[in-house]
Amino acid sequence: MWVPSLKSICLMKKVKLACLIEDDDIMVLISKKFMAATGAFEEIISFKNGKEAYDNLKAMLESGKPLPELIFLDLNMPIWDGWIFLEEFKRLPVTDDITFYILTSSISNEDFEKAKIHGLEERYLMKPLGINTLREILSTLL
């Protein structure tokens, strides 16, 4: 089976804006380093919890700024967890095409069942985000 190289992926598709919603600074650092190494991400923003992400993305929407094309969402965070963020975000009048991935350490069947309800069972990833996973994700965005 042919797997595209990072170089071929980068020549085909660039993600203008990606978002990490993650409270663990180490995971943010690791994820950003791998994302930067692909050369496929023009800008990466991050937020420490669902409420912070919601408020900022809502402000971007209201001001007419482009929203992220790709959002990696942690589930277990303080203030608003990933599920609260997802429920509230879906209520916004977003017309942009946004691809969500759950990026979690949760092995809970309950979380996986919730992912199914949201249509994200195929986008339920275990931390940390790595180069091979990014290759697969980028190839689906082409």
Image (cartoon, grey):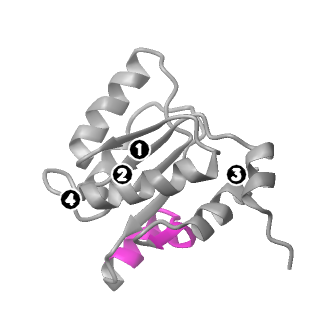
- Taking the image as shown, residue 97 lies to the left or right of residue 104, namely right
Q: CA distance from mark 1 to mark 4?
A: 19 Å
Residue at image point 52% right, 67% down = 130
- Tell me the kind of residue under disc 4: Met
Mark 1 sits on what residue? 90
In percent of width and height, residue 72 lies at: 44, 54
Q: Nearer the viewer, mark 3 or mark 1?
A: 3
The reply to whether the C-beta atoms of the residues labelled 1 and 2 are less than 8 Å apart is: yes
Q: CA distance from mark 4 to mark 3?
A: 27 Å
Mark 2 sits on what residue? 86
Instruction: Please rate how many residues cluster around mark 2, counting C-alpha atoms within 10 Å: few if below 14, some from 14 to 19, many from 20.
Output: some
SS label for mark 1: loop
The single residue placed furthest to the left in the displayed view is 79
- Tell me the kind of residue under disc 1: Lys
In percent of width and height, residue 35 lies at: 53, 52
Mark 4 sits on what residue? 77
Which of marks 2 and 3 precedes in the sequence?
A: 2
Residue at image point 43% right, 63% down = 102
- What are the residue bounds of the magenta stretch? 111-125
Q: Which label number is shown at residue 141?
A: 3
- Taking the image as shown, residue 69 lies to the left or right of residue 142, namely left
In percent of width and height, residue 86 lies at: 36, 51
